[in-house]
């Protein structure tokens, strides 16, 4: 965690982005200490020490963009599925309420 504290001091915005992306400071620190294929087997810390901070930024931003795209895709799929369910429900009353389906779907994707 000392390395992550140093990252927070020297590159505060990058550290903040990592915490936001991974959901916790410990997960972000763990990622920075893990060997990454995109960093040619080096860790995020190694890349920063080598003076290639932009490489870490590129990786973080790519992950963030992919996460946003996946979230949008799942949202669209959920909306379409609920619309289809509502239509079939009108045709066959007795199906599970749509609000319950949304909760179940959110629960499955959050695990």
Image (cartoon, rainbow, N blue to C red):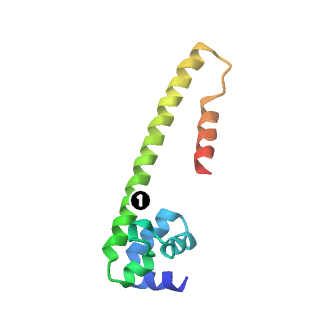
Residue sitting at the far top: 91
Q: Is residue 64 above or below residue 13?
A: above
Q: Quadrant of residue 94?
A: top right
Location of residue 110 in the rendering, given as x and y in whole percent from the top left corner: 59, 50
Q: Secondary structure at mark 1?
A: helix
Viewer can see residue 11: no
The residue nearer to you, when weighing 109 against 12, is 109
Q: Quadrant of residue 49?
A: bottom left
Location of residue 41 in the rendering, given as x and y in whole percent from the top left corner: 44, 72
Residue at x-position 53% and y-position 29%: 82
Q: Is residue 73 above or below residue 55?
A: above
Residue at x-position 38% and y-position 65%: 59
Residue at x-position 52% and y-position 30%: 81
Residue at x-position 51% and y-position 24%: 84
Residue under label 1, please give it.
Answer: 63
Location of residue 23 in the rendering, given as x and y in whole percent from the top left corner: 53, 64
Residue sitting at the far right: 94
């Amino acid at each position: 965690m000392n390395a992550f504290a140093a990252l927070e001091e020297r590159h505060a915005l990058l550290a903040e982005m990592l915490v936001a992306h991974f959901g916790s400071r410990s997960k972000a620190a763990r990622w920075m200490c893990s060997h990454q294929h995109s960093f040619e087997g080096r860790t995020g810390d190694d890349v920063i020490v080598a003076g290639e901070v932009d490489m870490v930024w590129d990786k973080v931003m790519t992950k963030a963009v992919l996460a946003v795209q996946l979230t949008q895709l799942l949202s669209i799929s959920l909306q379409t599925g609920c619309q289809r369910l509502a239509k079939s429900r009108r045709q066959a009353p007795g199906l599970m309420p749509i609000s319950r389906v949304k909760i179940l779907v959110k629960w499955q994707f959050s695990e």
